[in-house]
Amino acid sequence: MDLTKSKLAIILSKLANNEKQNIGLEQYELPSERAADLLWGVYMNNELKGKCVADLGSGTGMLGLGALLLGASKVYFVDISESSMEICKKNHEKIKKEYGTVLKFGKSEFICKNVESFDQKADVVLQNPPFGTKEKHADKIFLEKAFSCANAVYSIHKSSTRNFLEKFSAANKFKITDEKKFLFPLKQTRIYHVKKNYNVEVTWLRFEKIA
């Protein structure tokens, strides 16, 4: 099978979402086309094929499953939400059944725990962490864990926190090497929210350990 970015987006668009999202955990689903675009960039950087990947805050598995489709040798799916993890496993079964043979699927490990409990090493981390608006510094917790287990980290954050992230990464002996801004669509989550959907400007950042 000759996988292209557009085909990847189509496959990811068929994954099941978690209809019972925990707003307190800031479980925001990444649109499939955007996920495919971001993953394709990682793939073109030669950081997926044959690599061990940690998908921290994996949710229903979009980033990690995309990594497997693009040749990752192993993916750790890590999420504290039991409902999201169950959907992630079902999505994995579906994708592996349909594409596992032709794409030589790598190994997978599902860890339903707080991300702080994750103690494995990986070549690269892919994560769509909480923005830290519901629980202060939740994004910081995810980055600290990511920095501890891989030398290359791709992470989505609110663009307004860019200066803080640069200083924080430097303090942890990491540097920002690439970044890509885009609008992240968020759905109405409270009855008092006026708009059904609104966009938040975020940035997909690549952090690299300083030698």
Image (spheres, rainbow, N blue to C red):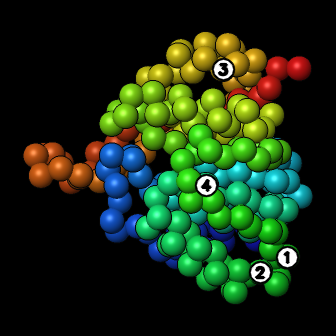
Left or right, 184 with reference to 23: right
- Amino acid on which the number 1 mark rests in the picture: Lys
- Amino acid on which the number 4 mark rests in the picture: Val
For disc 1, the marked residue is 104
Secondary structure of the residue carrying tag 1 is loop
x, y percentage for residue 194?
13, 46
3D distance between C-alphas at marks 2 and 4: 21 Å
Q: Residue at x 70, y 19 (%)?
A: 172
For disc 3, the marked residue is 169
3D distance between C-alphas at marks 1 and 3: 35 Å
Secondary structure of the residue carrying tag 3 is helix
3D distance between C-alphas at marks 2 and 1: 6 Å
Q: Earlier in the sequence, mark 4 or mark 3?
A: 4
Label for residue 78?
A: 4
3D distance between C-alphas at marks 1 and 4: 22 Å
Q: Can the viewer see residue 144 in this picture? A: yes
User: Circle 2: is it few (<14), some (14-19), or many (20+) Cα within 10 Å?
Assistant: some
Secondary structure of the residue carrying tag 2 is loop
x, y percentage for residue 168?
60, 17
User: Circle 4: is it few (<14), some (14-19), or many (20+) Cα within 10 Å?
Assistant: many
Decide which of 123, 144 is in the foreground and name it: 144
Q: Can the viewer see residue 40 in this picture? A: no
